[in-house]
Amino acid sequence: MRKNRLSRKVTSSIALATAGTLALAGCGSSDSDGTSDSGDEVTLTFASWLPTQDQWQDLIAEFEEEHPNINIEFDRNEDYEAYLTNLDNDILAGETPDLFGIQVGSSFDDYAEFALDTADYAEDWIGGVNSEALDQTTTSDGTVAAVPLLLAGMEFYVYNLTIFEELSLELPTDYDSLVDVSQAARDAGYSPFAMGAADAWHNADFFVWLATQYGDGDELYRAAEGEVPWDSDALVAAGEKWQDLFNDGVFQDGA
C-alpha cells in the first residue's frame, strides 16, 4: 500500500553511443538502512525504455530486498518514440514519473526541467563520475541534472556458422571478401547481412562506428561540435561506403 509519494522528479538519461544517466529527486529520501525519512513505505515510479524488462525485474527485486521500505513501479516501453510520447503525456498531466529515462542530446534541457539537481543528493560522489559523461548530462545553464548510467555505442554482428560451413565460406577479412560472401549467400537463397535500417537508432549507431574508420576517427564528433563541416572528406567517404553496403548487396534487400 502506498503511504508516501515523492513529488519531485528524477531523470535518467540513456545516451545513444554516448554516456547514459540517472538522476534522483524527491521531497522524501531513503537513509542508509533503506527506509524513508519518515519511516513510511515509499513507492517510486520509474519509466524507461532500457535495459530489457527481464534485466530490470532482477535489478528491482534485488534493490527492494535491500531496501524493504522502498517499492519500485517500473513502466517500460521498448520503442523509444512511443516511450517519449507516453512520457510527454505524463508530464502534461502533471504525473511525471519519479525516475525516467531520456537520451542526452538536444532535448536534454527540456526534460531536465523536471529533474532534481544532482547537487541536492549526489554532491559527495558525483565528482567521481566520468567527466565526459557528466558533460552530456549538464544543462546549458551548468546544472548536472542526471547521473550517468551506462555507455552505449556498439555495433557487432553474429554469423551463422552452419550456413558458412554449408557454403564452404570463410569469414571476410576486407570489404571485397565481404561482398563476395554476401553474393554467395544470395546465390544460395539466403539474406546476406541483416541490417535493421528502418530504425533510426540502428542507422545512427552503425554510422557512428563506420565514421570512426575514416580520417582521425573523431570527425563525426567534431562535426557535431561545429568544429568541421558535415561534408568533410572523411564524413563524405563514410557516407559513400554506407551507400555501397546497400548498392553492393551486402545488406539484405529492403533493408
Image: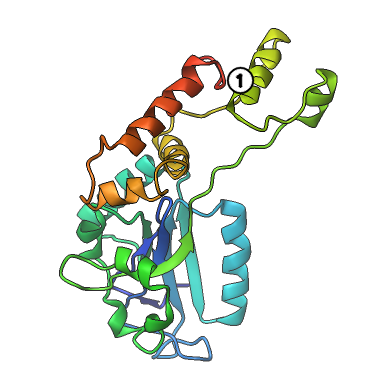
- The answer to which image quadrant residue 133 occupies is bottom left
Residue 200 lies left or right of residue 188; in this view the side is left
Q: Is residue 137 visible?
A: no
Q: Which residue is mark 1?
A: 179
- The answer to which image quadrant residue 98 occupies is bottom left
Helix, strand or loop status at disc 1: helix
| Position in image of residue 44 (x %, y %) | 42, 70
In terms of depth relative to the viewer, which is nearer, 17 or 9?
17
User: How many labels sit on residues?
Assistant: 1
Vertical relation: 72 (above or below) 254: below
Residue occupying the point 65% across, 14% down: 183
Vertical relation: 125 (above or below) 12: below
| Position in image of residue 54 (x %, y %) | 62, 54
Residue occupying the point 57% across, 21% down: 250
Q: Please say which color scheme the image uses.
A: rainbow
| Position in image of residue 58 (x %, y %) | 63, 63
In terms of depth relative to the viewer, which is nearer, 177 or 90?
177
Residue occupying the point 40% across, 39% down: 204
Residue 195 lies left or right of residue 180; in this view the side is left
Residue occupying the point 41% across, 50% down: 16
Q: Is residue 58 visible?
A: yes
In terms of depth relative to the viewer, which is nearer, 75 or 239?
239
| Position in image of residue 15 (x %, y %) | 40, 55
Q: The disc labelled 1 sits on which kind of residue?
A: Val
Vertical relation: 43 (above or below) 111: below
Q: Badge 1: how crowded within 10 Å, few (<14), some, or many (20+)?
A: some
In terms of depth relative to the viewer, which is nearer, 98 or 39?
98
